[in-house]
Amino acid sequence: MRGTHIRHRRGVVAALIAALLVTGVTVVIVGVLGMRDDDAPAAPAATTADGRRPWQVTLEVAASSGYVVTAAITDGDRQTLTVQNLALGGKPDGTYGGEVTAFPPGTLDESQFGAVEQGDEFRYLENFAFAGHAAGETAPWRTPAVGRRDPSGTWIVVYADSARADGRIARADLLRLAQAVTLGSPRDLRLPLRLGIAPPESLRLTYVRSPDHRIDRRPAAVGFSTGSRAPSGAAVYPGPPGGLSVALLTAARDASWPGRRATLTGKTEIAKLPAWYEPNGRLTVETEHCIVTVESHLPRKELDALIENLVIGDCADPESWIPPLS
């Protein structure tokens, strides 16, 4: 879809490659360098309701609070952070600290918190209701939560995933985390890949997951869907939300990869890279430092074109990651 991608002129791509090589990162560039210098750039990607690009967040956690962000997610107009509490557990990486999610004006049932009285900024609820526990689930799920209405009208809600908290996160912990959270200027989320072409017609970038791989080993991911797809109403994101037409997940080549590789079927090759295309709509591509998995039922030709025009870096080196679009 036009408007979701700025085409890279050859000089811009060359600068990107040079910057990555200076850091010692091996990158795979396929197809992008074949673009003509006179190709006109596409229009910038559309912004969300709160003025962010689809790969940006405005949620911030104070560095002095004792919390560190381990994963940042954008899902349409919604943005979510998972945090680690460095003050608990006696471990260098601390322990799971909770979730923070921001609901732009009009996207949250504010009646759950009632009228916020003057001077009562933080509202604690024993049973805040989400549409589901994990993205893709529809059975209502309830959890203790602290909510705060930002002057912009955005609601910031802090809570914990009970499956990870194991009863360790109490009301005082949620209030402490809520006091550390603010809304700031948009900042880019970074991944080990960048798209070199626009997604298929009528689709746009609506989902990004950027983990801190020092603590969170789940895949980095981007997802494309129609602009009408609503964000997930569930509490946590163990995987991409439903309704995506294309999801690209990246993972480092680790000790488990050879075993997984042996189970793949439909061996093929894309841009001189080993690949496996399975009939369930999954395409897996192996590079020197990354495994890229594409989940989609779009025609194979369109999926190949996405891969052929990716800039793929080092999935094991987050310091080298870049925004998925620009």
Image: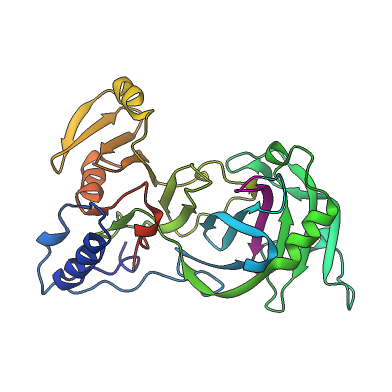
Foreground residue, 149 or 3?
149
Foreground residue, 248 or 71?
71
Residue drawn where x is 66% and y is 68% of the image: 64
Asked which quadrant contains residue 132, the reply is top right
Asked which quadrant contains residue 266, the reply is top left
Q: Position of residue 318 (x, y in %)?
A: 40, 54
Q: Which residues are magenta?
A: 91-104
Tell me how the rendering is colored.
Answer: rainbow
Q: Is residue 318 above or below residue 52?
A: above
User: Does residue 203 belong to the magenta stretch?
Assistant: no
Q: Position of residue 152 (x, y in %)?
A: 67, 78
Identify the image quadrant of the C terminus.
Answer: bottom left
Q: Position of residue 302 (x, y in %)?
A: 24, 46
Image side of residue 32 versus residue 160, left or right: left
Q: Is residue 15 above or below residue 265?
A: below
Identify the image quadrant of the N terminus.
Answer: bottom left
Foreground residue, 137 or 274?
274
Q: Position of residue 90 (x, y in %)?
A: 69, 45
